[in-house]
Image: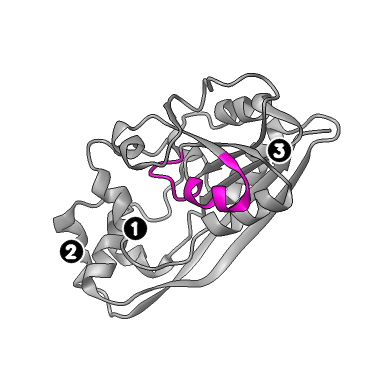
Amino acid sequence: MSALPNDYDSDPERFLSSGKYPHDDVHPYVAARLARARARRVLDVGGGNGRLARLLPGLSMSCLLIDLSPAMLALAPRPVVRADGSRLPVADASVDAVAALYTLYHYADPRVPIREARRVLRPGGLLAACAPNRDSNPELAPVLPHWGARSTFDGEDAAAIVTSVFSARGDQVEVERWDGHLNTLSTAAHAAGFLRIYGMSDAEASAAASTLDLPLTMTMRGCIIYATKAP
């Protein structure tokens, strides 16, 4: 088990490639959940180029995006702060919600940024975190050398990890799992862009995509964890 490498500055296109083709993702669902929780001040930790942050102003929420990558921060909507999720530059009990989407697997111990999220949440505040399962996209197992490898924060283990931190009397943890045909790779270019997410170079992704029987519908598995700090 190891933390996934952080290459957002050395290879930003790996991350950005996933946004070039239409696909379902968690960001609008998380934004709607934060709105239902009546959050007004949101901290988007590891927010990248702002996929969540761009949705929040239209739902009457202000957002401070935090990320370590200068390349991602340059593309993100303002305000932004370059900081580490394990040392948030935010006062105790000062925000209504914290989002940590597709980022906790970059930490050797994801409990550290989760503790920081709980620290900065006001009583009754909400954490939203998500991760794919190790067995997500089984259709790609033949072309992905490390398919199924364990990271430090996979969907199979995410709920238990979050619950180990949100364990005070009155804390609540909910799990929303997904497991279904949520994305179809329609062309070789689309498939290559999707494979780049898994750390492949352009050449590797293109070569692997050429072996797939397209169009290919993906079985995507994972979860969103919502943890509420005790009132």
Give the percent coordinates (x, y) of residue 62.
58, 39
User: In terms of sequence position, does the residue under pointer 1 or pointer 3 come before the other?
Assistant: 1
Which residue corresponds to mark 3? 163
Q: Which residue sits at x=32%, y=80%?
A: 215
- Residue at which label 2 appears: 206
Label 1 crowd bin: few (<14), some (14–19), many (20+), radius 10 Å: some
- Report the front residue among 31 and 220: 31
Question: For the residues carrying marks 1 and 2, which lies nearer the camera in this image?
Answer: 1
Circle 3 crowding by C-alpha within 10 Å: few under 14, some 14–19, many from 20: some
Q: What is the C-alpha distance between the residues marked 1 and 2?
A: 14 Å
Q: Quadrant of residue 141?
A: bottom left
User: The magenta stretch spans which residues?
Assistant: 47-62
Type of the residue with mark 1: Ser
Q: Is residue 145 visible?
A: no
Give the amino acid type for the residue marked by disc 3 in the picture: Thr
**Residue tagged 1:** 18
Q: Secondary structure at mark 3?
A: helix
Circle nearer the N terminus (2, 3): 3
Residue at the spot x=28%, y=80% of the render?
213
